Image (tube, grey):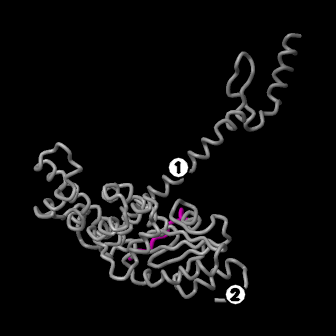
Amino acid sequence: MNYLIFALFTTLISNAAPPAPGLEIVATVNGEPITGEALEEAIKAQREVIEQQLEALRRTVLFKLIDNRLVEQAARAAGLSLEAYRQASVEQVTVTDAEAEEAYQRSRWRFPGALAPEAKYRIRRELEDNRRADALRRLLELLRREAHVTNYLLEGGAADAASEPAPSEGSAHAPVTVVVFCDFQCEFCRQAQPVIGRLLEKWGKTLRLVYRHFPLPRHRHAFEAAKAAVCAERQGRFWEFHDALFAEGRDLSEAGLTALARSMGLIEAEFRACLNDASAAERVRRDVDLARKAGVKGTPAFLINGRKVTDVDQLDGAIREASFQPVQGR
């Protein structure tokens, strides 16, 4: 009899349906169960944040892997070892005594209490590191421009360029968003500014303009000018500074940029500190990454509700098409 009861109980257990996914018990508290579903619901928000961070990490690391592969290929093409290629292309930088002295006189306030030889040594190392970073940036931009790279993680690049924080004009709810990628040393970008201004006036509330930096490596002062614009933005003066940078004949050297900031009444100490802050350069590089994700290769370039346009003369028609509105009088 006992055997028959045991056999029946065993049969019932073996034939029982498994718990539904998420309903399995992961813990009990004084006999009360906590299910996997409850656990998943509790971590839902945090998991979404982690997944977004993981996706951003994948993209960032993939960019680095692509850059590393481009450098390796360039070294092979030059018949050099990777180390020899990097030494010739990036590491060979010089800072003269006169340059170190000039930088010391300009920024000695950054080294309170330090002896002059120590401050100059630190300044020389900073200048050398900055020049190596600039040399690497120019090299990578050149290699990227000449290479054919297919990056399958770049879907949504245009959406990111339109949505991530950046200087903008117009309502965030405007039906048409124009993302403009510009280089302050690009003559075509300078010539496009009056056209952009007329379009903003013509389309009014229909249009939102988002500015992105895309300094070209062949333009010596473009990256520094973009950093300076970031620094002006931090003091709430981006668009005024932007307009001044595109003025014909503007001096875009570091001295010229600092003089411009001074003439506009920006806080000079904050402006100088910002120019030397790695976060300003990183902000510009982030815009460059967004441009690459969106398939931008030159300047000026525009994304109109995600559609790429490189001809300034086509902007009005592209905006009209995106807005589904009839032609307005000029």
Q: Secondary structure at mark 1?
A: helix
Image spot of residue 243 (x, y percent): 44, 74
- Local packing at callout 1 (Cα closer than 10 Å; few below 14, some 14-19, many 20+) is few
**Seen from this angle, which residue lies furthest right?**
1
Image spot of residue 55 (x, y percent): 54, 53
Q: Secondary structure at mark 2?
A: loop
Which of these two is toward me, 106 or 33? 106
Which of these two is toward me, 246 or 94? 246
Q: 112 left or right of 203? A: left
Which of these two is toward me, 73 or 330? 330
State which quarter of the image contains the C terminus.
Answer: bottom right
Name the mark on residue 252.
none
Where is 161 relative to 246, above or below? above
x 35%, y 58%: residue: 267
Q: Which residues are magenta?
A: 146-154
Closer to viewer: mark 1 or mark 2: 2
Residue 10 sits inside the magenta stretch: no
x 87%, y 15%: residue: 5
Mark 1 to mark 2: distance in Å?
A: 45 Å
* Picture quadrant where residue 28 is located: top right
Q: Amino acid at mark 1?
A: Leu
Image spot of residue 270 (x, y percent): 34, 55
The residue where tag 1 is placed is 54
The residue where tag 2 is placed is 327
